Image (spheres, grey):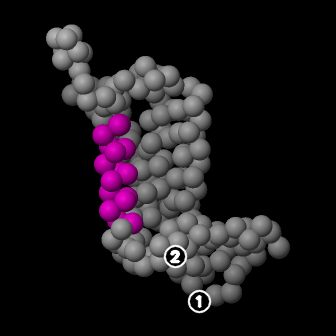
Amino acid sequence: MNRKKVILVIIDFLLTAILIAADQATKYFAVHRLKGQAPYPVVDGVFELHYLENRGAAFGMLQGQKFFFIFIAAVILGIIVYVLWKMPYQKRYVKLHITLVFIASGALGNLIDRVRYDYVVDFLYFSLINFPVFNVADIYVTLAAFALAALLLFVYKESDLEFLTFRTKRFRDLK
């Protein structure tokens, strides 16, 4: 592995650690300050801190399917690690790199909760629009998923993503 790739892997781990630490710190706050308390209005009628133990997915779907969610998170993380490993060290891939690190960090943040508590700690609630309660890891995943879609639709061409194929030039040249 070349030196630049090693540096990039170290940066990935540091950024992931920082993002997970921020997510876990906010959840620690929620568990120790909000659990068992009435919702705390930040902006009255618009946004509040509301403790919720989410045993399902978004919008409370698939309640109690802990091992399913752990499996899905492991598969997603495996795919992300594979893509990050295969991605060339070039400036044009920095946005894609950061986007995938944010998705991985959000998945790991919620995975930690599922393993530790058997549920995910949610505490951010937009009461104005009655949006489902969510957390910082959910923000990472959601914003990064939109960014990933935009990158794949508007920035990268199919030829830019050839590094993801299992074929190598060596085998194609034999034909």
- In the image, residue 26 sits, relative to residue 54, either above or below, namely above
Q: How far apart, in angstroms, are the residues tagged by discs 1 and 2? A: 15 Å
Q: Quadrant of residue 85?
A: top left
Can residue 103 be found in the magenta stretch? Answer: no
Residue drawn where x is 47% and y is 77% of the image: 63
Q: Amino acid at mark 2?
A: Asn
* Front residue of 130 and 17: 130
Which mark is drawn over residue 26? none
Give residue 149's position: percent from left, percent from top.
Answer: 56, 39
Image-based side of 116 in relation to 135, left or right: left
Mark 1 or mark 2, which has the lower sequence index?
A: 1
Which mark is drawn over residue 54? 2
Give residue 157's position: percent from left, percent from top.
Answer: 50, 22
The range drawn in magenta is: 69-84
* Front residue of 40 and 153: 153
Image-based side of 101 in relation to 59, left or right: left
* Front residue of 61 and 163: 61
The prevailing secondary structure element of the residues shown in magenta is helix
> In the rendered image, which quarter contains the N terminus?
top left
Give residue 86's position: percent from left, percent from top.
Answer: 31, 31
Residue drawn where x is 59% and y is 35% of the image: 150
Dot 2 alpha-carbon crowd within 10 angstroms: few under 14, some 14 to 19, many 20 or more: many
Which mark is drawn over residue 36? 1
Image-based side of 77 in relation to 103, left or right: left
> In the rendered image, which quarter contains the C terminus?
top left
